[in-house]
Image (cartoon, helix red, strand yellow):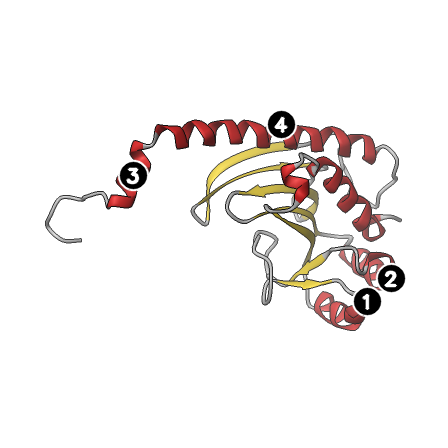
Amino acid sequence: MGGGLPRFTPEELALIRDAHVFHVKARATETIRAMLETIHAELRAELKSHALLTPPDFDPAKCQFVKGEHLEDFPYQYLDFPKHFVGDDKFTFRSLFWWGHHTVFALLLEGRSMKRYKKNIVDRFPSLADRGLCLSLAPTLWEWKAGEGYTLPMTRDRRSQIAAVLAERSCIKVARFVPLTDPAVEDGRLGQTACETFRAILPIVLP
């Protein structure tokens, strides 16, 4: 850094002087939380209808709401439900609202049942394909960008490609990315979209 005092840019000054922006952000944050609570209620009802292939000590009631400001410099809010992070075992469905990017509904899997989950994806691929789902190509479960190099669409013509990617994976993330311009966001139908996504990925985790 130089020896002068730090100075705001004109753009930064315009932002920090605009109190209205922060009031709107606070209201939007509350709206997102309400949407996540709706998703929780709808997923809780959905979960009661299914017997899933879950890790030992899985608690179907466990959930977590999280709010932060710095997912690559952008605010974010998410719900984990169902939520299971115990040792090396992960079995979680995350509903993530990433400001400036998209909403993501993602199944996060890792641990002792990976062979079974991989087999289910390959064997039941016709039930999973062409339903708006993507397989994450990232080596970690915590990458939330989509597109070339990040995700592989699960379409019928990619079954062998999906199988090849899975063979090298120690964890699995299957996700649906919903643009913030999608009518479901504007119309408050993200709860419905979350349940549709959860039902779409069910073949992976059914016995």
Question: Secondary structure under badge 2?
Answer: helix
Cβ atoms under marks 1 and 3 closer than 8 Å: no
Residue 184 appears in the picture as rendered = yes
Q: Position of residue 111 (x, y in %)?
A: 71, 52
Q: Residue furthest left?
A: 3
Q: Is residue 110 left or right of residue 2?
A: right
| Gap between marks 3 and 2 measured at Cα | 52 Å
Lower position in the chain sequence, tag 3 or tag 2: 3
Give the class, few, some or many, for how many residues have Cα within 10 Å of label 2's Cα (few <14, many ≥20). Answer: some
Residue 198 vertical position relative to residue 128 in the rendered view, above or below:
above
Residue tagged by mark 3? 14
Q: Amino acid at mark 4?
A: Ala
Question: Secondary structure under badge 4?
Answer: helix
Q: Amino acid at mark 1?
A: Arg
Cβ atoms under marks 2 and 1 closer than 8 Å: yes
Q: Amino acid at mark 2?
A: Pro
Residue tagged by mark 1? 156
